[in-house]
Amino acid sequence: MVAIRNSQFATENPQSEIGNPQSGLVGAAAIIAAGNIASRVLGLVRETVIAYLFGATGLVSVFRVAATIIQTLYDFLVGGMVSAALVPVFSDFASRENRAELWRVASIVLNVLAIFLALAILVLEIFAPQLVWLLGSGYDEELQRAAVEMLRLVLPAVFFLGMSGIVTGLLYSLKRFTYPAFTTAAYNAGIVVVAFALTPIFGITSLIVGILVGSAAQVVLQLPALRDMQYRFAIDFSHPALRRILKLYAPVVAGLSISVVSVVIDRNLASHTGAQSLAWMQNATVLVQFPLGLVATAISFAILPELSSQYSVSSIQTTEHRTLNTEHFQSTLAFGLKLVLLLILPATIGLFVLARPIVALLFEHGAFTPNDTEWTARALQFYLFGLPFAAIDQPLVFAFYARKNTLLPNLVQFVAVAIYLVVALALVQPLGMIGLVIANSAMLTGHALIMLWLLHARLGGFGRQGVIAMTSKVIVASAAMGAVAFFVARAFDSILLQVLASAVAAGAVYIALLWLLRVREAARMGEMVLARVRRQRIASRNE
């Protein structure tokens, strides 16, 4: 416990942050990535447990309806607020001299959101039948009644998820990443443990109890990181910080609204392309989301507090110092993008080349047939065309959030959804499910390209950071790595050996080529990781 606390306080040292913010970025990204790995692995375990205990019955379907409503409510009420508003605003008060005001602002936000969430839950409890009908009108009356019961039982989870999101935003602004990185893992673990323990007593309702336990565990897990917080029972609806949060979050709500509409349309169109299409698309999406969360999300959340701090400082400086700080902003963002590209491009090509053996290794068991593997792999390969763009899009969006501009990224979301609709409606008839996958990749690509253009127009791009030069080298190394993976996989009959041998050989080739091509960012990232490991060993010995 002492070692963890020391490492958190060390990141608040002004000299360590100003002297080498990129080192802190890599360390923070590594912590968040570790949490992502844990959460995604436990998420896979969660899905396996649900299938093992309850199969794919109508009750499982209506449970998904209730769980979807909970997740959607959280995203609307708090989830999108964390990166768009909470971290940028809290970061304005995160310095030691402003720490007392930070605790006051955080207390106000917690208290106001607690009241709002409690009232929202009360209203939703009353209108639960209408919510269930919106998402599951096709179910019979008995299943709809079960869904309403589940929803009314699980709605309090929104309160715990909301409180957890606010605490996460506060900790990120303080650059304390360890505890919030593992909140989703705690959530999934709660569902798994409770399901195994209580299913013999409560049946499928045990999953509802698991969600409640998991959401409460998210709050409890993060409290040790805030033991120095001076909480106040203060409510001030007129506080400027609260007003800024609401102002920043308003455009995000609009963007989330259009995203929900696009999901509804996507699911509706998918239902017309075959009964199994959505299942294949979902399995492929799980594989795409793994590197996206592990790399892009981790690095984006790691650079957000640093970008927010740099923008806050530049807003009160002279013109000369503001120009210098803009260069630091560009440098931090460029370094984050380089790390994303360095890791996501080889992952994309590797998944593309090994799509069929990877899908077969992970999913082709029990009722999952070779035909399912074939179609899931096809969907995965077409999804992968949008993966690099989705990966660079996250830090670009966060860069605008750090500059207190949440409107532009969410206006771009409207354009991106329009791209999806045009492509999907044009291709769904001739290509079926694959047409929808291509439309999704087109949407992600369009959003990222527009964000790049806006960044260049508003910030002057990345300055002289060598992003294009490094990307060219990484593409060459990744292409060679993909060729090695392809030929190594053909040398084995065993699916397990195809995946493992190809991954080892291709990974070795990629690292060697990065060294030969003198990709400095790869060497720098390795040095920073080793330095962090050494510091942790020293801290452990001192403890």
Image (tube, grey):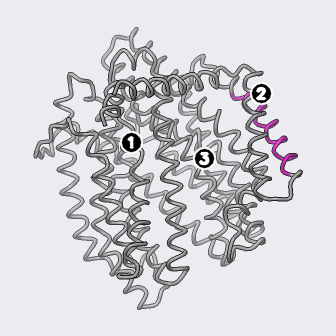
Q: Earlier in the sequence, mark 1 or mark 3?
A: 1
Residue 33 vs residue 225: left or right?
A: right
N-terminal of the pair, mark 2 or mark 3, is 3
Three-letter code, disc 2 = Leu
Compute the Cα span from label 2 to label 1: 38 Å
| Amino acid carrying mark 3 in the image | Pro
In the picture of the structure, the residue carrying the numbered disc 3 is: 291
Marks 2 & 1, CB-CB < 8 Å contact = no
212 up-or-down from 177: above or below? below
Q: Which mark is residue 313?
A: none
The residue indicated by pointer 2 is 513
Residue stretch in magenta: 471-489
Q: Give the main secondary structure, helix, strand or loop, of the magenta stretch.
A: helix
Circle 1 or circle 3, nearest the eye: 3
Report the label total. Answer: 3
How many angstroms separate mark 2 from mark 3 (CA)? Answer: 21 Å
**Residue 144 location (% of width, % of height):** 41, 85
Report the residue marked by disc 1.
Answer: 84
Task: Name the N-terminal-most of marks 2 and 1.
Answer: 1
Q: Residue 30: percent from the left, percent from the top?
A: 50, 36
